[in-house]
Image (cartoon, rainbow, N blue to C red):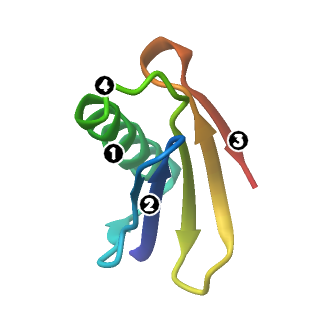
Amino acid sequence: MARYFFDVHNNGDSDWDEAGTECADRSEIEKAAKSRMKAFAARCAKQAAPVTLAVLAADGGVVLTAYGVGEGLHLFWR
């Protein structure tokens, strides 16, 4: 399995993933991305700002970007 890093941001807060997460395939990457975005949005609920996420491979390449939360989540594979 490969290690991916999930960095989440909004208009004032950031959650930099320094440990990374092992994911076997795209479905596991999507599941981890949705989970991190949901948790981040819950912590920052008082701010009305869009949530964005970048998923990076261990070599630093971007593999997925996303914005929104819940039903309004939009994923873009790179």
Considering only order in the chain, which callout, 4 or 1, is on the residue closer to the N terminus?
1
Whole-number angstrom distance, CA of label 4 to CA of label 3: 24 Å
Whole-number angstrom distance, CA of label 1 to CA of label 4: 14 Å
Residue farthest to the top? 71
Helix, strand or loop under label 1? helix
Whether pointer 1 and pointer 2 mark residues with C-beta atoms closer than 8 Å, the reply is yes
- Residue 46 badge: none
Whether pointer 2 and pointer 3 mark residues with C-beta atoms closer than 8 Å, the reply is no
Helix, strand or loop under label 4? loop
x, y (%) of residue 57? 56, 74
* Location of residue 50 with respect to 76 vertically, above or below: above
- Residue 45 badge: 4
Q: Callout 4, which amino acid?
A: Ala
Q: Callout 2, which amino acid?
A: Phe
Of tags 4 and 3, the one toward the viewer is: 4
Helix, strand or loop under label 2? strand
Q: Which residue is mark 3?
A: 76
* Location of residue 43 with respect to 72 vertically, above or below: below
Of tags 4 and 2, the one toward the viewer is: 4
Considering only order in the chain, which callout, 3 or 2, is on the residue closer to the N terminus?
2
Residue 8 appears left or right of 36: right
Q: Callout 3, which amino acid?
A: Phe
Q: Callout 1, which amino acid?
A: Arg
* Location of residue 29 with respect to 20 vertically, above or below: above
Question: Which of the 4 image quadrants contains residue 59?
Answer: bottom right
Q: Which residue is mark 1?
A: 36
